[in-house]
Amino acid sequence: MTKPFTYASREEIAVVLNTIEGTIPTDLMGHVYINSPCGTVNNPPPQPEDQPDGKHNSEYGEMLFNGDAMLFRFDMNEPGKLSVQSSLLKTPCYYADYATRYGTSYHAEGKYFRGMGLARTSEYLGSRNQLNTALNLFKFASDEHTRVTVNFDAGRFYEVDASTMILKTPIGTNEEWLSEFPPALEYTFPLTLSTAHPSFDPVTKELFTVNYGKSASNLAFEARTLTQGILHEKELVEAYIKKLYDDLEKRKLKGCAVPGFILELLSFLSSNKPAKNTDGTLEPFDVDGALQNAEQNYRDVFGMENVVYLLRWTGTGKLDKWRVVDKNGQNLYIAQCMHQTNFSKDYIVLVDSSVKFTLDIMFSVPFPNQPWLDELLRWITSKTMLPETPLYIINRASLQTGVETVTAQSFTAPLETVHYSMDYDNPNNHITLHTSHNTASCAAEWIRPYDTLAIDRTQAAYKNTVGLMTCGEMDIGRIGKFVVDGETGIIIEQFIVHSKGFEGDIVQNVKAHTWAVGLNTYRDILSADKVVPRIRKNYWQSYGLDKRMLTHFIWSLYYDYKNRIIDADKLLDYTKQGVPFCLLRQDTDTMKIDEDYWLFTMNENLRSLQFVPRNRANGIPEGVDVDMDGYILCTMVIGPPNLPPDINDYRREVWLFDAAALHKGPVCKLAHPSLQFAFTIHSAWSPDCASSPTTYHVPVKPDYDWVINKFSNIEKKAWMEQFMTEHVYPNFDKTV
């Protein structure tokens, strides 16, 4: 069954997939979990421009990732059969969101959640923990079966029942986690900055994560970077600024329902209004000066601070917690976000990931009737990612009970990094990291309704791509390997490779490439039973170049990219020609990426990839490389090959590749009319999926009563108690 490009069903399913090509291998085993977003309580994606009653849909234009979590589990224990089950993950804030959905009296009163770029927040209730990004496997010494967590960058992580895929409990109480929101706002559902990738060590049976805070000025403006977009659009921005002041004077913007911080920003801009010349024209507008004034006003007003805590959970009791400081004893400053954690035998490595979490990605279409104003706000607030990646090393031996702080040794990778894998072995204190570099391509950006294409700025972005992550990167991606001294942070060796996949300037005879390097997988990645002493064979996806995905905004924002290899104008020509997705295997010793790969055709969109080991009842035969002895399961969204604009004729499939012979193509393709996803993300393979009886449990009512009891506003406190009792608590903990 075909659906729109960005469509995702919110219906839970339990079906057997149909084989549409090839044969299902008989030596598959285990279960693959894949996390994904599936829209909001109001609509599945793609979000319509208008609600059924004809009113504008405020969620139109929001990022596809900003939605509830649909968790999929692909079961492969019956020979010749592959089935899938899905579950919509329902946190307490989900039920609050559902109770205040469009059409309710709460919504009419303004007490509802709305999209805010990468977040979904309410000015009365707080922030949604959508759990839609990643998952992790763990197994403590007393556990018989593998257990599963689901994770989100802006919320506590939860354990989910491996069998039923129903949420069991958050890990840690609200009291144990630092909220990013200042207490004065009195939000029931706190914004908790964490990581989508906690780390579990199967040897020591420890599960690590982070909880960090950003000062108000850091969160809103990120002082380390400068506004870049206006450099190439000065005339456009100045014209929009003039129109802004004209409309403000004529009160055309009065009554717009927009987040408060945007109105504050407009107020700051207004206070910096340039003087008029004698002929009525405006003096050149000092955008950076206005933003600096706004930042100074925000700084430390709310009592928010830059701080990072490392958390450890061992299955029972409270979380262990350490404040992480640098060698000078100062709190760490996270400019962007902490999307991932990772570890080796003796060290934990934290990262300031190349995913922005600042003002410019906290709104989408605040002024639906003035798209020029939406575009103006984006131009004057948008900043590039840092062109390098700060990382922080913590010696695990320093994590002692009773100690409140630990010192991190820092080092900097010379390119942007979101994801990185690590060898477990660290001989002579040498840590080995395997890195993907999303150069000049920010995973926090998405295609807006008012965007135009880079290849033709008069051409509006295609409607069926609105909300998709902007994957049209502005330089060639790279794959890296770094060997770092864990005690000093000195980079001992570094290897960085890239390939555009073709010779000359004509895109033809394309081979393995690194355009927009994305997710990776390898045998025993995220295993709850085994560590990987040394990663030898690493499987990567590369997005390629797609003219639909590179917008003029991104083109301008990253035109002067610091680490550029490919000339920007030449890159634009390559994008116009198009380069398809690629699945490749990398040898980490030689760093070669072309020993085995599969090149897809244009508009065969590879979403997730996961290594699935072969079922070897009698052990692995001699001469078989264990690191390639399995399959790569891929989720696919497939459309017409000639990329026609706004054709909503896409099908969802699951492809299986032989991990030792990618070049032979998929060994089978499977699908089912009920299996409908838009953008699956992170995945994990588990040998089992049984429920695990545990004593650890955070009951919902006491957990949120603790938050509400701290409210000083008596009226709001009473309202929230009644609201939670009526709409949230009945869905949990019937006995408390």
Image (spheres, helix red, strand yellow):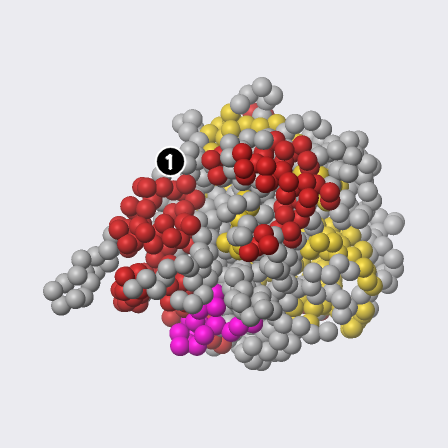
112 or 437, nearer to the observer: 112
Within the image, what quadrant is residue 107 found in? Answer: bottom right
Residue 493 visible at all: no
What range is drawn magenta here? 448-465
274 or 607, nearer to the observer: 274
Chief SS of the magenta region: loop
Q: Residue at x 62, y 78 (%)?
A: 640
Q: Residue at x 54, y 61 (%)?
A: 59
Q: Badge 1 is on which residue?
A: 300
Q: Residue at x 68, y 46 (%)?
A: 727
x%, y% of residue 1?
Answer: 73, 74
x%, y% of residue 314?
Answer: 69, 30
**Mark 1 falls on what kind of element?**
loop
On whether residue 215 falls in the magenta region, the answer is no
583 or 628, nearer to the observer: 583
Q: Residue furthest top?
A: 402
268 or 627, nearer to the observer: 268
Tally of numbered discs: 1
Within the image, what quadrant is residue 671 found in? Answer: bottom right
User: Where 586 falls versus 465 (above or below)?
Assistant: above
On whether residue 463 falls in the magenta region, the answer is yes
User: Where 278 falls versus 294 (above or below)?
Assistant: below
What amino acid type is highlighted by mark number 1? Asp
Q: Left or right of 481: which side holds 151?
A: right
Q: Left or right of 364: which side holds 589?
A: right
x%, y% of residue 524?
Answer: 71, 47
